[in-house]
Image (cartoon, helix red, strand yellow):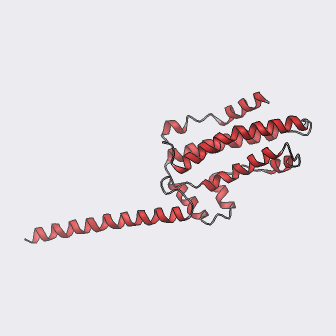
Amino acid sequence: MQYQDCAIDVQADEADALLARSFATAMAGLELADANINPQTGLATDYLNHFNEAIMLLEMVGECPDCLADIRRWQPMSYREHFLESHFRGRDLAIAAYAGADPAARACLDNLASSMTTVIEATRATMTADLPAQAAADLAARAARWLKPLIARAGAVINGDIEISATSASDIDAPQASADRLMQLA
């Protein structure tokens, strides 16, 4: 009889532990969601604001050539660097969640960010002082159009809208290849 009582107690303890882990997981998910971090992926779309700012500036070059100075001041930032510099209310949680995010999703997002950064930097380097204003505007507009699908794909990764595997993370064009194709069109 004592053996049965002990077995029942062990089963109850295991059930309690499972329930506690489930509750902790649910609470962590709510905390992430409250901080605008996708609980499924552990990633936050706020990082994309860094690239959206560059796209906005590139789109404005045609109407406001002074934006060239702003695009030249744009600095690349990693996910972690972005949140360390931001006023995002859940920035510490975003950094911690990123560290625990699926490595394939992180690699895919990092590769997309690297591609976007390379395109922006190559565009900036090409928009020198001796480049005619219309050519600079055309290049900037082309770069913005090139970046938008990359932003959309990064958003899909962050939101868990696409299935990521280790192989798909490496399927993204190498950053320099993306920039080279853009510059061939310039």
Q: Is residue 134 left or right of residue 37?
A: right
Identify which residue is drawn at 52% across, 37% down.
168
Which image quarter is the N terminus in? bottom left
Residue 78 screen position, x and y as percent? 65, 51
Identify which residue is drawn at 70% across, 37% down.
146
Identify which residue is drawn at 86% across, 45% down.
63
Name the residue at the front extreme.
63
Residue 181 screen position, x and y as percent? 71, 29
Looking at the image, residue 145 lies above or below residue 46: above
For the residue pair 167 and 50, the one nearer the viewer reads as 50
Which image quarter is the C terminus in? top right
Identify which residue is drawn at 67% across, 31% down.
177
Report the number of numbered marks.
0
Name the residue at the top extreme.
184
Looking at the image, residue 98 lies above or below residue 1: above
Residue 32 screen position, x and y as percent? 52, 62
Residue 84 screen position, x and y as percent? 66, 61
For the residue pair 89 and 77, the one nearer the viewer reads as 89
